């Protein structure tokens, strides 16, 4: 049985309570952390509709943030409060040094000890203050208000209100009001999701050697490290799908957009769905990532957008020319590393605290790092991270929230170039174009600089550069917003009237008929094999345009798009199942293998809940790391190799002419069948009986599969929306949030959205004042 994350495995506060609050006014506002800077106080109205989605209305940005902070505390108090402890570097003090700092997330799952050293070293007070001070008034007001709203709810709980709720944290000493500084510390940490946070343990364990000098000579050739460790969260599965259609492709003649991030199901990096309204100023709906005070992905009445994790690198390591353990030479000048002594407090089994001190080092580029790779030196490598220098990111997101047209939206992209690690697609009201953009914060490392300065390639597009000469420093474009970053002219984007798409491959195949080329390798690859998930995404579009998907006509509309994106097709099975069965099912087989052949022969090649055979194919295709190889691990599997002129349809066909391949296929089949039998799952079980989302007290059937198998509909689905702009009508948006709004198992909104997702029951989310009032479940008025 495949079970998605079970909350009871890891939790600092998993059992929360529920109450419907009709009104709440006043409250203790004496705390300086929650007072309005202009002395006018805060007020907000929180209206909750189906699935508990909060619609927040306020007179200004401070009030909008205030309502958001209060609402998310109602739903996720213990998860977010404990995360603030982690971001401050106090996890060991309260939770013990050896416990995990998170179950999953953008900074992985390190111990509290290592997380404490990282956040105190990299996301330190000076870094946070500099980021905060660079923000405009609207971002500052949102953040102050968010801190005030969250803190108000904390004080209410600490004062005895909301009895029976938040039982695992309400009486804990670490549940405390927060400040604006805490909000910005969380934002800085989120900025680093595709860079320093991915390398947390490598940074905090970098220590100088006892030897007096180390150096690294130019290597080159074979990549020196594992690609996966440089992905967001340091793992496979974090990514997204998006399809955006222009007027030539839609029945309406206007834009149509699908957003589908594959994100975290638990922990502080989960999405939170909400609407924020400031009459005459802001009216935006969508999702934030917990702790970010604005909508990061969503729609307003004129714009809808989506994000997918980009292939562009957000940092480069530098190999220093070390003179001794703490000095290096650059341009002939000797320089000293900065030594930073950090002390954390560790909770002992008896509750006492014991200090632990570690000295960490940074160069002019940034922190020293030890990749733990025998091909690289343990000392002498440092890291420059563009997003430690990027103060534009959340200004850019808020500008998206405020945009009034697609041109306005694109202008915000070029003005800020602050999006930290995601691609963007967008459509606009009355506009026939669909936009793709990876105009984001990327180190200005053109291929010519790599040719001259690369010491070793760490992964595709990620060079280890020489730190011995300033000639190898990041370059500067005349149109760059950030020093050392590419300007918009050297970053990819595309407007199309048919479609744009991204499934976490590079910008190259944004549109299968109009590849983007000529960009630096640090942004992404070109002319390279696409993942099966990417290929299926383009195939879904191709099948629609050629009337091959069972629907009439060749154009797209909202109804058809909502059906297509959840149809759970498995491209790997479509390409390989029949030839694999032909190769393995005719010989001498065990009874289990014979049954598997029959089950797979009858399987419809989907991962829908009623699909019989999907779990068997997964075991054969994916294999099991460290135990047996699956079809995906077989070398020379394909008969027809990749062709950059036909990237959607190649490689293809089983390589039946290679006996080694056929022997490996037979072994993968036998091993996969044996693994299913050993798991106790019947070979002929419907997928919905063996693949579930574990919620406290219930297991909810889940459809789809892994992207590596060629599923477009994946198990990491989180927030989804399909949005268009009917002429003369308000924005029309259908949404799903697979993990739900609340981390409280006793909340009515803990599992209801997950159950709707399991039923493929899209939610027409209310947006206008009339729609909200008609769907309203509760209303809360707060002020201080």
Image (tube, rainbow, N blue to C red):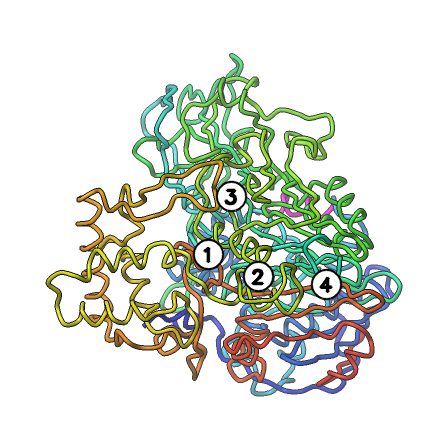
Sequence-earlier tag: 3 or 1 = 3
Q: Quadrant of the N terminus?
A: bottom left
Separation (CA) of disc 3 from disc 1: 23 Å
| Residue 345 circle label | 1
Task: Using a 10 Å C-alpha cutoff, classify the residue at mark 4 as few (fewer than 14 neighbours), some (14 to 19) or many (20 or more).
Answer: many
Q: Which residue is mark 2?
A: 84
**Residue sitting at x 40%, y 54%:** 708
Queried whether the magenta region covers residue 123, the answer comes back as: yes
Disc 1/disc 4 C-alpha distance (Å): 52 Å
- In 3D space, how far apart are the residues under numbered discs 4 and 2 (Cα atoms)? 37 Å
Q: Is residue 75 above or below residue 429?
A: below
Residue 552 x/y as whole percent: 61, 66
Residue at which label 4 appears: 724
Helix, strand or loop status at disc 2: helix
Of 637 and 406, nearer the camera is: 637
Q: CA distance from mark 3 to mark 4?
A: 37 Å
Range shown magenta = 122-133
Q: Residue at x 50, y 76 (%)?
A: 758
What is the residue that sits farthest to the left in this orientation?
588
Main SS type for the magenta part?
Answer: helix
Q: Nearer the viewer, mark 2 or mark 3?
A: 3
Counting every numbered tag in the picture gives 4
**Position of residue 510 measured from the top left corner of the image (x, y, whole percent):** 59, 44
Residue at image mark 3: 196
Q: Which of the pair 143/586 is nearer the observer?
A: 586
Q: Which of the two discs, 1 and 2, labels the residue nearer the N terminus?
A: 2
Q: x, y percentage for residue 292?
A: 65, 59
Establish if 219 lies above or below 372. Answer: above
- Distance, label 1 to label 2, CA atoms, is 16 Å
Where is 215 relative to 40, above or below?
Answer: above
Considering depth in this image, is 533 or 140 the residue closer to the camera?
533
Q: Nearer the viewer, mark 3 or mark 4?
A: 4
């Amino acid at each position: 049985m495949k079970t998605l994350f079970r909350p009871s495995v890891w939790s600092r506060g998993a059992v929360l309570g529920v109450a419907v609050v009709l009104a709440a006014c006043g409250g203790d506002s004496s705390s300086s952390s929650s007072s309005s800077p202009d002395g006018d106080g805060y007020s907000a109205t929180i209206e909750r509709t189906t699935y508990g989605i909060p619609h927040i209305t306020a007179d200004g940005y401070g009030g909008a943030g205030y309502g958001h902070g209060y609402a998310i505390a109602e739903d996720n108090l213990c998860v977010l409060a404990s995360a603030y402890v982690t971001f401050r570097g106090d996890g060991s003090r309260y939770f013990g040094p050896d416990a995990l700092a998170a179950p999953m997330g953008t900074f992985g799952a390190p111990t509290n000890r290592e997380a404490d050293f990282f956040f105190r070293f990299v996301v330190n007070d000076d870094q946070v203050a500099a980021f905060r001070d660079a923000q405009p008034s609207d971002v500052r007001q949102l953040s102050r208000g968010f801190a005030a709203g969250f803190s108000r709810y904390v004080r209410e709980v600490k004062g005895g209100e909301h009895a029976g709720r938040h039982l695992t944290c309400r009486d804990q000493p670490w549940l405390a009001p927060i400040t604006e500084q805490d909000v910005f510390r969380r934002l800085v940490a989120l900025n680093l999701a595709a860079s320093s946070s991915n390398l947390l343990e490598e940074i905090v364990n970098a220590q100088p050697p006892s030897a007096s000098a180390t150096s690294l000579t130019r290597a080159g050739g074979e990549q020196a490290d594992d690609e996966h460790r440089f992905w967001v969260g340091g793992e496979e599965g974090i990514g997204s799908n998006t399809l955006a259609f222009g007027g030539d492709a839609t029945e309406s003649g206007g834009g149509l957009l699908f957003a589908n991030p594959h994100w975290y199901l638990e922990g502080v990096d989960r999405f939170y769905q909400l609407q924020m309204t400031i009459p005459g100023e802001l009216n935006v709906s969508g999702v934030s990532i917990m702790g970010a005070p604005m909508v990061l992905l969503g729609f307003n009445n004129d714009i809808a957008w989506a994000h997918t994790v980009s292939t562009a690198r957000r940092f480069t390591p530098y190999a220093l020319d070390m003179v001794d353990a703490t000095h290096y030479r650059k341009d002939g000048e000797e320089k000293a590393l900065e030594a930073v002594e950090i002390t954390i407090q560790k909770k002992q089994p008896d509750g006492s605290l014991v200090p632990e001190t570690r000295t960490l080092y940074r160069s002019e580029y940034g922190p020293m790092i030890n990749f733990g790779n025998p091909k690289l030196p343990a000392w002498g490598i440092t890291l420059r991270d563009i997003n430690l220098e990027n103060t534009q990111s959340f200004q850019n997101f808020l500008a998206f929230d405020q945009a009034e047209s697609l041109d306005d939206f694109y202008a915000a992209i070029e003005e800020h170039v602050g999006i930290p690690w995601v691609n963007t697609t967008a459509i606009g009201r009355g506009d026939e174009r669909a936009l793709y953009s990876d105009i984001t914060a990327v180190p200005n490392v053109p291929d010519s600089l790599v040719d001259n300065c690369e010491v070793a390639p760490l992964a595709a597009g990620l060079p280890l550069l020489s730190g011995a000469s300033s000639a190898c420093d990041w370059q500067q474009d005349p149109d760059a917003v950030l020093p050392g970053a590419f300007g918009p002219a050297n970053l990819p984007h595309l407007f199309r009237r048919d479609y744009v798409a991204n499934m976490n491959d590079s910008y190259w195949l944004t549109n299968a008929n109009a590849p983007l080329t000529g960009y630096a390798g640090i942004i992404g690859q070109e002319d390279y094999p696409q993942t099966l998930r990417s290929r299926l995404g383009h195939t879904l579009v191709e099948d629609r345009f050629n009337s091959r998907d069972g629907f009439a006509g060749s154009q797209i509309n909202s109804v058809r798009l909502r059906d297509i994106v959840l149809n759970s097709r498995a491209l790997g099975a479509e390409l390989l199942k029949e030839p694999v069965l032909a190769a393995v099912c005719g010989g001498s087989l065990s009874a289990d293998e014979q049954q598997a052949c029959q089950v797979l022969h009858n399987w419809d090649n989907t991962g829908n809940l009623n699909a019989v055979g999907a779990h068997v194919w997964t075991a054969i295709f994916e294999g099991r790391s460290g135990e047996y190889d699956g079809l995906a691990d077989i070398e020379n599997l394909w008969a027809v190799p990749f062709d950059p002129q036909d990237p959607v349809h190649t490689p293809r066909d089983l390589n039946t002419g290679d006996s080694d391949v056929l022997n490996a296929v037979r072994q993968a089949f036998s091993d996969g069948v044996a693994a299913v039998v050993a798991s106790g799952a019947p070979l002929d079980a419907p997928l919905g009986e063996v693949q579930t989302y574990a919620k406290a007290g219930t297991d909810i059937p889940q459809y789809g599969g892994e992207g590596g198998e060629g599923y477009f509909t994946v198990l990491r689905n989180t927030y989804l929306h399909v949005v268009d702009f009917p002429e003369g009508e308000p924005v029309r948006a259908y949404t799903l949030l697979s993990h739900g709004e609340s981390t409280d198992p006793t909340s009515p909104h803990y599992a209801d959205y997950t159950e709707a997702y399991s039923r493929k029951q899209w939610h027409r989310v209310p947006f206008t004042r009339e729609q909200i009032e008609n769907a309203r479940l509760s209303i809360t008025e707060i002020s201080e």
